[in-house]
Image (cartoon, grey):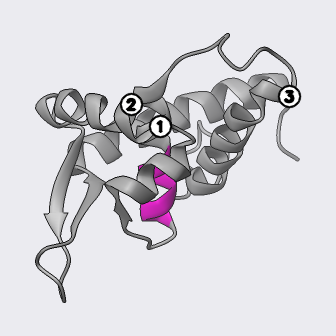
């Protein structure tokens, strides 16, 4: 699901790679700051889903919590709001209809792509690509 950006104004960038770098750097913040200094669980959930979808992975609620580095209770509290805002959706697994997975909606995925393109263009102003 990653896309390359090159319309003459934006740098070539693999959006999945950029999202992965941002997600990993976000998870590494506790090495530099107190763990409770930041709190952005909705964004952690969205980036984790974006990266998983880009790799072709499906995340259950339990796996999403581990992937985002969040307690299960936090994920469960945030899901209704993210679903209501049309950013993520639940879906059933093909083989086992009892298993429920989460993914970004088409709109949610598009919004993350737009944001990543914006970040890439801002970074290109600081560090132009060769």
Between discs 1 and 3, the one toward the N terminus: 3
- Is 102 displayed left or right of 27 in the figure? left
Q: Judge left or right: residue 109 versus residue 54.
A: left
Residue 108 drawn at (x, y percent): 28, 41
**Number of the label disc, if any, that sits on residue 62:** none
The numbered dot on residue 74 is: 2
* Residue highlighted by disc 3: 31
Asked whether the residues under the numbered discs 1 and 3 touch, taking CB atoms below 8 Å apart as contact, a structural biologist would say no
- Residue at 83% x, 34% y is 128
Q: Which residues lie in the magenta part?
A: 48-54
Q: SS class of the residue under badge 2?
A: helix
Sort mark 1 into few (<14), some (14-19) or many (20+) by Cα contacts within 10 Å: few
What secondary structure predominates along the stretch shown in magenta? helix
Give the class, few, some or many, for how many residues have Cα within 10 Å of label 3's Cα (few <14, many ≥20): few
Q: Which residue is mark 1?
A: 71
Residue drawn at 19 percent across, 89 percent down: 95
Q: Which one is in front, 3 or 19? A: 19
Q: Nearer the viewer, residue 112 or 32?
A: 32
């Amino acid at each position: 699901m990653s896309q390359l950006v090159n319309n003459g104004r934006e740098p070539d960038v693999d959006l999945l790679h950029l999202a992965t770098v941002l997600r990993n750097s976000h998870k590494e913040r506790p090495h530099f700051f107190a763990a409770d200094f930041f709190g952005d669980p909705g964004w952690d959930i969205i980036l984790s889903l974006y990266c998983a979808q880009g790799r072709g992975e499906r995340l259950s609620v339990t796996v999403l919590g581990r992937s985002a580095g969040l307690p299960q209770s936090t994920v469960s509290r945030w899901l209704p709001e993210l679903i209501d805002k049309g950013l993520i959706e639940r879906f059933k697994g093909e083989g086992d209809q009892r298993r429920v997975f989460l993914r970004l909606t088409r709109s949610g995925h598009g919004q993350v792509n737009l944001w990543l393109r914006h970040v890439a263009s801002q970074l290109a102003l600081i560090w132009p690509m060769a």
